[in-house]
Image: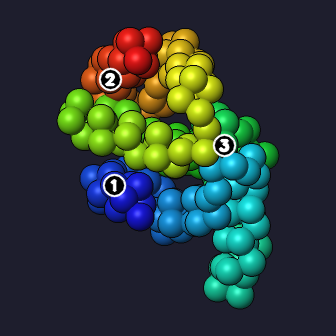
Amino acid sequence: MQHIQQLFGQFDQVKDNLHEPHIIALALLYHDVIYEPTRSDNELKSAEYAVESLTGYLNAEQCQHIYALIMMTASHQVDKWSDETNEGEKYSDAAYLLDMDLSILGVSWSEYEHYAHAVRQEYAHVSDDDYRVGRMAVLKELLAHPTLYLTDYYYARLEKQARKNIEHEITLLHAS
């Protein structure tokens, strides 16, 4: 719930930049509705649940768009859109969604540290050594990207702090 609350705080800040804020809000709400750390299909199950729940309230195209947005949160890559008339708008909204999902990385160190502890608690079933190796791999993969954020808005506000937080967590993981 903290993640959803944090995301909607971000949403309030950027909703005026979105072309379809209602679609993005629904994708945010549903993107982690199914979440079990031991499973690898959380996004798929969440996307399927969203479509099942929203069918009857939204048209098929809107449901498919939400499905695609939720699936993008698995890889944090914006998929190509086939509808060229709305491609730029959909890309922009998807980029904002993905940046909101990663916005926690660019908070103050004290907030980030709380987030990092929560991630560790989610993976309490994993041994300390295995967690350390896996978490460092994920963090190093993030740092390998030329930019963490896809939108100018998030890049300007969070990129520098996010990289600093990730590097600091890696240092702490190495030391433990």
Q: Is residue 156 left or right of residue 140?
A: left
Relative depth, front residue between 137 and 161: 137
| Residue topped by disc 2 | 165
Q: Residues within 10 Å of mark 3 (few under 14, many from 20)?
A: some
Label 2 vs label 3: CA separation?
Answer: 22 Å
Q: Which percent across, then down, holds residue 170?
A: 42, 16
Nearer to us: label 1 or label 2: 2
Q: Say which amino acid is labelled 1.
A: Gln
| Residue topped by disc 3 | 74
SS type, badge 3: helix
Q: Which quarter shows the C terminus?
A: top left
Q: Is residue 93 above or below residue 116?
A: below
In the image, what residue occupies the spot 66% across and 79% down? 54
Q: Which percent across, then down, holds residue 85?
A: 68, 49
Disc with the residue nearer the chain's start (1 vs 2): 1
Q: Which percent across, then down, holds residue 60?
A: 76, 73
In the image, what residue occupies the spot 29% across and 57% down? 9
Relative depth, front residue between 94 and 28: 28
- Label 1 with label 2: CB-CB less than 8 Å: no
Q: Which quarter shows the N terminus?
A: bottom left
Q: Is residue 88 left or right of residue 60?
A: left
Q: Say which amino acid is labelled 3.
A: Ala
Q: Say which amino acid is labelled 2.
A: Asn
Disc with the residue nearer the chain's start (2 vs 3): 3
